[in-house]
Image (cartoon, grey):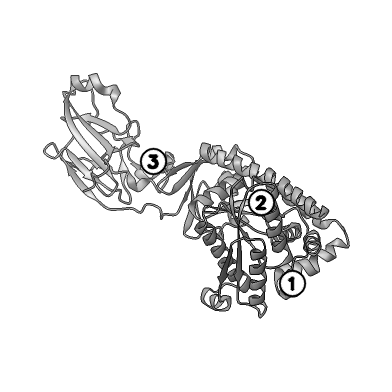
Amino acid sequence: MEHRKELVESVMEAAAEYELWAPHDTIVVAVSGGPDSVALLRVLHDISLTRMPLSLICAHVNHGFRAESAEEAELVRALAASLRIPFELGEFDIPSIIKESGLGPEGAAREKRYQFLIATAHRYHARSVALAHHADDQAETVLMRLLRGSGPSGLAGMRWKRTEKKVELIRPFLRINKTALVGFCREEGLAYAEDATNLLTKYKRNAVRLEVLPMLEQHNPRVRQSLLQLAEIASAEDEYMEANAAKCFDELVFTEHGKYTLKRADFAAIPSALQRRLIKLILNYLSADSSFMDYPKIEAVRRGTLQEYPTVWTLDMGGGYVCVRQYDTIVFSSKPLIRQVSYTYRLSLTHPRIKLREIGKVMTMKMLAREVFSAQEEDYGKNSAWFDGGDLVLPLTIRSRLPGDTIRVMGLNGSKKVKDIYIDDKIPSSERPAIPLVCDALGNIVWIPGVRRSMHAAVGRHTVSVLLLSLEDMEQGEES
């Protein structure tokens, strides 16, 4: 009785600290039939009667692996009946699923188990699924991840609470060791099943439990406690860092059409720990699949962003994603970069407005009296250009860039390559195809919108009429 009280107190303390449940919650309890899950069902039942009103559902999965599976299902059914708790059974032919899915036995069983538990929670409108992972499981998890080469998030081990498909997965026993749970079951006279596969070292977790941990305990008898403390500390610090990374994302990352853009100077100003987290967070937003997010790739992006040269590069992140540096801009994208498209349009006073559908822009021209233009000149920005209406040779041609294009720029003897101007102005190569070129009837490039105006037909003292060109974004629904 004393041990039961201690166990309930410990679980209630953790539940309050991590907000595992609230009064009148419905909780699906995953019960395999082993001592851990049998103890969990009994402890939660005790809490629901004496400490807090909770509605419990007992859920058991029969994987069809072993001859004892049917007996275990009946053991759990009988336990639920004795406590007057509804019982749900899920049965799966895991060997067949392994063949179909290509997953290993552990992976296939885990996937089906969680699917069933979450579906059961949805059916009962339950807030959470309670899992019986305990302190020894946590120590093994942290050690396995340490051996695998995990970062701080992995060293936090299993979480007390996480959400999957709008259902919380809670682990009330993470501070209770296996010995205490087995002892509790024996004291209370609770029947439980022993899984013989727990002794097979072909499973990685069993090998860690039966070989690696005992060897480490020879050097530090409290190594399990140390791993548990590491998980607690890493979990709290990981949450703090994740919150800071999310704050950095909101402040530094510009999001548009599935692309995530940040400035090199902003990135360099944050600590390296946050730099890695920010890259990982961006990749998380790009894709739910984290299999391609290994440390070397994240570090390659980080170092490539901080280095002085080269200032232009593309890094294939895997999974159909790229990270591109264009001078001082870093872009993460799941879409291919804009490809060069070819187009040619005529612009004349009889056709003074054309849609450049290939780049989603509209070009307009109008002729203004010099006095009218002078009164409005300060209203025109970099997406407008003006010329002496008498000197500019019409009609104009609006076209895409061609190799070897040059422009005669004011204040410069001779011509300069358009490509060199783009490089000088640090215009990313991904943005260049979206910039049209405006040519006069003689073939001279007279304007690169937002970039340069040529020396041709400059407005001067003798100008009588001004030809005004403007480039704007095509309005939504205007593409047709």
Q: Whole-Å distance between the Cαs marked 3 and 1? A: 75 Å
Across and down, in percent, residue 187 comes to 81, 62
Assign a secondary structure to mark 1.
Answer: loop
Q: Are marks 2 and 1 in contact (CB under 8 Å)?
A: no
Percent x, y of residue 212: 79, 66
Instruction: Residue 255: give x, y in percent of width and height.
Output: 45, 43
- Alpha-carbon distance for marks 3 and 2? 73 Å
Q: Nearer the viewer, residue 242 or 148?
A: 242
Say if 198 sits above or below 127 in the image: below
Callout in the foreground (2, 1): 2
Q: Circle 2 sits on which residue?
A: 48
Q: Residues within 10 Å of mark 2 (few under 14, many from 20)?
A: some
Amino acid type, mark 3:
Ile
Residue at disc 3, secondary structure: helix
Q: Nearer the viewer, mark 3 or mark 2?
A: 2
Q: Which disc is residue 194 wearing?
A: 1
Corner quadrant of residue 138: bottom right
Q: Residues within 10 Å of mark 1 (few under 14, many from 20)?
A: few
Going from N to C along the chain, the mark reached first, 3 or 1, is: 1
- Residue 396 picture quarter: top left
- The residue positioned farthest toward the bottom in the image shown: 67
Q: Position of residue 340 (x, y in %)?
A: 33, 53
- Left/right placement of residue 116 relative to residue 357 reads right
Disc 3 packing (10 Å; few <14; some 14–19; many ≥20)? some
Residue appearing at x 84%, y 62% in the figure: 216
Residue 215 vs residue 136, the one in the foreground: 136
